[in-house]
């Protein structure tokens, strides 16, 4: 499998990921619905934010679907067998609730980080 050369960044927006993978953003959004292991975070403005592992996983999915000609279900099975994807039945209600809570906390943190950056900008532009 070809390894994708990623820029030296921690996070990528969906447009950047689409350009790197040479697919349209709607394809990535579709894959998010089909593969449970893809759960990008959202910025304070609601923009999808993918980490390096997400982008590598998307690259693997693209390879399986486009090069190896797997079906979506076949790719899911392959990823499950290789520890990248969990079966729907594997996540307990508690695990799903914990994930939702974690996602909510990350969204709050992202919003606070954005607000702090705005506050810092205002302070530095006002000279004090």
Image (tube, rainbow, N blue to C red):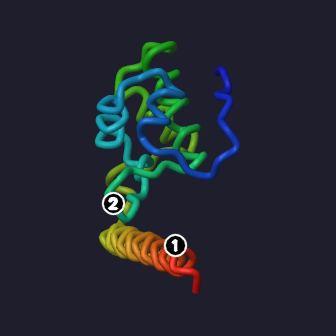
Where residue 93 appears, as percent x and y from the top left, is 30, 70
Q: Which residue occupies the foreground of this view, 115 or 17?
A: 115
Above or below, comparing residue 57 to residue 65 in the picture: below
Where residue 19 appears, as percent x and y from the top left, is 48, 27
Residue beneath the point at 44% across and 30% down: 18
Image-based side of 80 in relation to 89, left or right: right
- Which numbered tag is attached to residue 121? 1
| Residue 98 visible in this rendered orientation of the protein | no
Q: Which residue occupies the foreground of this view, 67 or 108?
A: 108
Residue beneath the point at 62% across and 52% down: 10
Give yes or no for contact between labels 2 and 1 (Cβ–Cβ under 8 Å): no
Secondary structure at badge 1 equals helix
Residue beneath the point at 42% across and 58% down: 41
| Residue 92 visible in this rendered orientation of the protein | yes
Secondary structure at badge 2 equals loop
Q: Nearer the viewer, mark 2 or mark 1?
A: 1
Image-based side of 43 in relation to 56, left or right: left
The CA distance from mark 2 to mark 1 is: 18 Å
- Which numbered tag is attached to residue 45? 2
Residue beneath the point at 37% across and 65% down: 44
- Which numbered tag is attached to residue 39? none
Neighbours of disc 1 within 10 Å: few (<14), some (14-19), many (20+): few
Above or below, comparing residue 62 to residue 116 in the picture: above
Task: Specify the farthest residue to the front.
Answer: 127
Where residue 25 appears, as percent x and y from the top left, is 35, 32
């Amino acid at each position: 499998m070809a390894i994708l050369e990623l820029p030296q960044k921690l996070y990528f927006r969906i447009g950047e990921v689409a350009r790197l993978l040479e697919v349209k953003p709607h394809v990535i959004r579709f894959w998010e619905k089909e593969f449970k292991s893809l759960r990008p975070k959202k910025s304070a403005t609601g923009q999808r934010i993918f980490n390096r592992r997400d982008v590598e996983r998307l690259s693997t999915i693209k390879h399986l679907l486009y090069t190896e000609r797997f079906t979506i279900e076949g790719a899911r099975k392959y990823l499950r067998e290789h520890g990248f994807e969990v079966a729907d039945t594997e996540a307990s209600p508690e695990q799903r609730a914990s994930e939702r809570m974690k996602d909510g906390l990350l969204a709050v943190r992202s919003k606070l980080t954005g607000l702090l950056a705005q506050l810092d900008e205002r302070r530095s532009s006002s000279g004090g």
